[in-house]
Image: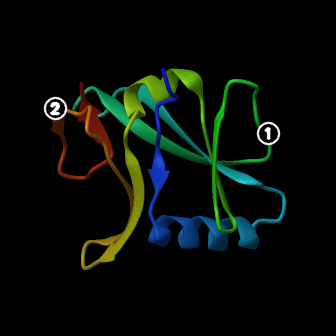
């Protein structure tokens, strides 16, 4: 069985590279799933400089994203995107496993 894939859009890669470039002590954006949020689970985004053995490492252009193996179970097949619109700027995750999500786009249910 192949590794569950998570992809990064071009706009997300560009924004991650910009953020990492402005913080020289950090080498990657860690995306994780934790319990809570209005729909049951929520996404957490952290700038980090450490990588663990079980991390999925996604690199695109100058962007590097880490996802731990437990979060990957919930995120398999997702795309990480960066949206800049009238509502503001944010990372959003298009998750095919989510059966419900909240209006803010940061929490979901499986």
Compared with 16, 99 (above or below) is: above
x 50%, y 27%: residue: 2
x 46%, y 31%: residue: 4
Compared with 40, 108 (above or below) is: below
Q: Residues within 10 Å of mark 2 (few under 14, many from 20)?
A: few
Name the one closer to the observer, 27 or 106: 27
Percent coordinates x, y for residue 31 in the rendering: 54, 42
In the displayed structure, does residue 39 sit left or right of residue 44? left
Q: Residue furthest front?
A: 1
Residue annotated with mark 1 = 50
Residue annotated with mark 2 = 99
In three-dimensional space, the C-alpha distance between marks 1 and 2, rounded to whole angstroms, equals 32 Å
x 64%, y 74%: residue: 18
Label ID, residue 103: none
* Secondary structure of the residue carrying numbered label 1: loop
* Secondary structure of the residue carrying numbered label 2: loop
Percent coordinates x, y for residue 28 in the rendering: 70, 52
Instruction: State yes or no: discs 1 and 2 in contact (Cβ < 8 Å).
Output: no
Comes first in the chain, label 1 or label 2: 1
Q: How many marks?
A: 2
In the displayed structure, does residue 3 sit left or right of residue 62? left
Percent coordinates x, y for residue 38 in the rendering: 23, 34
In the displayed structure, does residue 50 sit left or right of residue 11? right
The image quadrant that residue 89 belongs to is bottom left
Q: Residue furthest bottom?
A: 86
What kind of colouring is applied to the model shown?
rainbow
Q: Residues within 10 Å of mark 1 (few under 14, many from 20)?
A: few
Name the one closer to the observer, 59 or 27: 59
Percent coordinates x, y for residue 34 in the rendering: 44, 27
In the displayed structure, does residue 44 sit left or right of residue 86? right
């Amino acid at each position: 069985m192949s590794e569950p894939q998570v992809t990064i859009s071009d706009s997300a890669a560009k924004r991650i590279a910009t953020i990492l470039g402005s913080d020289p002590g950090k080498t990657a954006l860690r995306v994780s799933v934790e319990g809570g949020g209005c729909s049951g689970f929520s996404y957490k985004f952290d700038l980090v400089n450490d990588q663990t053995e079980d991390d999925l490492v996604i690199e695109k252009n100058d962007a590097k994203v880490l996802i731990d193996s437990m979060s990957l179970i919930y995120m398999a097949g997702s795309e990480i995107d960066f949206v800049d619109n009238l509502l503001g700027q944010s990372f959003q995750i298009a998750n095919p496993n989510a059966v419900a999500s909240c209006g803010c786009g940061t929490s979901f249910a499986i």
